Amino acid sequence: MNDQLALNPNKIVKALQKPAVDFTKQDIVRYIEQNDIRMLNFRYVAGDGRLKKLNFVINSKSHLEKILCMGERVDGSSLFPFVSADSSDLYVVPRFRTAYVNPFTEVPTIDLLCSFFDNHGDPLESAPEYILHKAQRTLKERTGLTMEALGELEYYLFSEIDSIYPIVEQKGYHESHPFSKWGLVRREAMQVISEMGGNIKYGHAEVGNIIANGMEMVQHEIEFLPVPIEQAADQIVMAKWAIREVAYKHNLEVSFAPKIIAGQAGSGLHIHTRFMKDGQNAMADDQGLTETARKVIAGYLMSAESLTAFGNTVPTSFLRLVPHQEAPTSICWGDRNRSVLVRVPLGWQGVGDRMLLSANPQEPANGVRAFENNQTVELRSPDGSANAHHLLAGMAVAGRFGLEHPDALQVAQDLYVRADATKVEGLKQLPASCFESADCLARDRARYEDGGVFPAGLIDSQIRNLKAFDDLNMSEKIFGHADSLKDLVNLHLHCG
């Protein structure tokens, strides 16, 4: 059986016995007819990076085919801050490969992700999904490489204190029930995300255990598998929605905010990337990390300050990016080093079969499969406030910038550290506020506008939005003011 079909949790894939990427309109219609689907939802990512929805009742087969073929009109001025109200109509058209059975509705419903088009029928230049598509396309045209990514999505669940097995603060990493709480919510969310087409690697309890204000706040993480960046961004957006739905069903509050209690572990959205050449991972070979990987790392480091404009978009982002809390502040990179901005994790080169046979001496040596090249590099600065499509598009631009920069290898050599990065003198630091981040984006804007990837109007809008927080020197302003800090955290508790 095709590897994409065996054990695939997507109900439509299993029923049609074909990969989602090959879905046609008639496939969707056939599944709807055979499974008594009564409703259809269009979903799309607007300018705020959050998932939106449009509901349809299926009135007839001809009505269904019309919806699937033509899409529908929406008010673009209510979805994007830079679309004028006097010419606001946009089209949303479904992408059949994204179809899934909605796991939360009582009435059988199929959902599809959509693309935006303008009045001429052209892709909307400023739509998050199309910006990311342009970033990938330009990368491929100019370097011959494509980018894949996976997100590590961290979040907190809030509940009453358990008096039987109380949590231990800051000791939750990979803990299991009953010493960690609400693993059932994480597992349920993982199941529905996979049924919706998400490619999940694993889930686990994270380090953050907090007891405050009569509540337990327990941190979890769901990590995905590497896929093309367009799909990776969709996975993050869909996963946030699914986790919120599952938590709400269990009467729990969930937050992806970068910081919920000062001095306690924050939640990041670490992004692992790998650049592919003709279907092969170009980040490592038998000799270790390749020149391609080091150039990409250099691109991330040279663009690190302005990337925060897409990856750290609320003032509390900069309460997380402080020294000594496993969140990066210094612009540097290293191997297996969690104090750096760009980390090169273990990649299994040359050790996979040896470990397998040591742990399983009964395994026949000639039956061991060849281990694939899993090497990635991890950007550790982003958090859950990010617009995932903008962030990954920005990272694709930054990676391309490094690949094309004549001094990239020297930059990578100069910014490599082995020690605790917070103790290395002379390293540039990330911005300390949204206001500073906006200034960095203004300085680097030509980099992101190159090739038409980010429209100038969107960059202008992002700079305005970040500066509107007026958070320059925020840490100094709120230091010692507990109520102000609490108000700030609560204001951005449900960002992203």
Image (cartoon, rainbow, N blue to C red):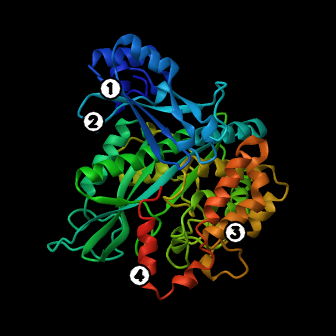
Q: Amino acid at mark 3?
A: Tyr
* In front: label 4 or label 3: 4
Residue at position x 68%, y 58% in the image: 300
Pointers 1 and 4 in contact (CB under 8 A)? Answer: no
Is tag 1's residue or tag 4's residue first in the polypeptide sequence? 1
Q: Nearer the viewer, residue 83 or 485?
A: 83
Q: Nearer the viewer, residue 3 or 170?
A: 170
Q: Amino acid at mark 4?
A: Asp
Q: Position of residue 182 (x, y in %)?
A: 25, 59
Q: Position of residue 318 (x, y in %)?
A: 55, 71
Is tag 1's residue or tag 2's residue first in the polypeptide sequence? 1
Q: Residue furthest top?
A: 62
* In front: label 4 or label 2: 4
Residue named by callout 2: 105
Pointers 1 and 2 in contact (CB under 8 A)? Answer: yes
Q: Amino acid at mark 1?
A: Met
Report how far apart the C-alphas of labels 1 and 3 lie in the structure: 54 Å
Report how far apart the C-alphas of labels 1 and 4 lie in the structure: 46 Å
Residue named by callout 4: 483
Q: In the rendered image, is residue 77 in sight?
A: yes
Q: In the rendered image, is residue 286 in sight?
A: no
Report how far apart the C-alphas of labels 1 and 2 lie in the structure: 10 Å
Q: What is the number of the mark on residue 436?
A: none
Q: Is residue 39 left or right of residue 112?
A: left
Residue named by callout 1: 39
Q: What is the number of the mark on residue 416?
A: 3
Is tag 4's residue or tag 2's residue first in the polypeptide sequence? 2
Q: Amino acid at mark 2?
A: Thr
Q: Position of residue 137 (x, y in %)?
A: 69, 36
Q: Residue furthest left?
A: 164
Residue at position x 44%, y 55% in the image: 153
